[in-house]
Amino acid sequence: MIKHIYTYFSYSILNSSLALATFSILARSVEVYEFGIIGIFLSILYFIIPVVILNTIGLVGINYTKMNDSDFQRFANNFFSMAILSSIVVFIFCLITIFIFPEYLFSILLIPFIALIITVNSFDDAVSIQKNDSKRHGKHIFISRIGILLLTLLFVFFLKLSWSYYILSILLAEFISLMFRIDNGFSHIKRYQYEFKKEYRIEFFRYGMPLFFLLAAGWSLNNADRFIVLEFFNLESVAMYVAAYQIGMAVNLINQSITNGTVSTIYQSIHDKKDTMLLINKYLKIFAIFYFFIAIVVYITFPVIVPLIFGAQYLDSIGISILIALAFIFNGLYRLPSLVIDFLKKNTLKAWITAVAALLNIILSILLIDFYGLLAPAYGTIYSHIFLIVVVYFASKRLLSK
């Protein structure tokens, strides 16, 4: 397990560096308010992506653990078919939306294609994680990240095209990554045949519908701050949060490395009816110590890193970056016990917990503005993530004791 976490972590450092480099280029190539627009657009885009598959990506890892190869291929066929049909619906919705926001026509029309390709790539990522194939997982994400960086450098920095060409860079890079995946043994898409049978529609509906509520709640938890800032401040202030989240994402990629390295072990432990809570407690102790040192590094280095990456016009994002990074640290600890809820498919429970945390985030973010100003939503995010880990830990403990 340690070897896999190390590989995930190594690729995470590399891939987060590429993402930071991309946003550094954007920050120095577009106006500050346009950087804020990019943040708002990405928030909407990454809400739509899970909608395309009814937020059922979690089923991939669960069914891969439980099913034989032929049954899993049938599941994959129905999963991809659902993604295609949903993308068509999203495309129709986008056609309607461009009449309301004609100035964003180019970027809006790219959304369904980006969502479909990222969905297919995410399926492959989920399978790689369950196989403990950390190198394959990291390599294909690297292809996406380096592609986005190079294309953004070409379109936005050298050719001086608008920020919307960054969105085109995402589409092209993800498509290139998909081609590499297919060439590198993505057998489930190679063997794909269209089918969308009733039994799978029911499975997707039963698993995914409670998660729509969770999706909305989770999206609010992680993105509400930017919209609150837009409401109470301006697009330039939103840009400070966009920069802060890109820095904080470095910590979130560490979280993903830890989750990816432990998910198959925890899932197998639950499946085999072992003492999973003992295993989770062991991981929590180890990673809590690790995150303590990460927090120290964040506090010392971020005041230097932020202006270095984004420029002097983003100095106001330093304090926000530190707070967002700390919130992601608590999110990393939350992910371990939440795997129990995911495996047992207690989606309604997870949705309610996340909804309460999101509501807490919104309320605190608004109430604290008089005390902390622009930092208020960042403080609200930290407190809501602390709430999440406490409640989810005891909920998971109770589920395993039954």
Image (spheres, grey):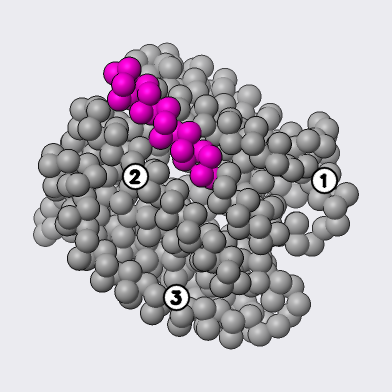
Q: Which residue is mark 1?
A: 73
- Would you say 73 lies left or right of 107 here? right
**Magenta: predominant secondary structure element?**
helix
Q: Which residue is mark 2?
A: 20
- Residue 201: assigned label: none
- Residue 287: assigned label: 3
> In x, y percent, where is residue 3?
58, 69
Which quadrant would residue 356 be assigned to in this image?
Answer: bottom left
Q: Is residue 12 shown above or below 28? A: below
> In the image, which is nearer the foreground, mark 1 or mark 3?
3
Q: Counting other residues with Cα less than 10 Å from the Cα at mark 3, is it few (<14), some (14-19), or many (20 or more)?
A: some
Instruction: Give how far apart the Cα atoms at labels 1 and 3 are.
Output: 36 Å
Q: Is residue 162 shown above or below 123? A: above
> In x, y percent, where is residue 113?
57, 26
> In x, y percent, where is residue 210?
60, 53
Return the residue nearer the eye: 126 or 153. 153
Residue depicted at x 63% and y 24%:
88
Amino acid type, residue under disc 1 in the picture = Gln
Residue depicted at x 51% and y 38%:
144
Q: Which residues are magenta?
A: 141-164
Amino acid type, residue under disc 2 in the picture = Leu
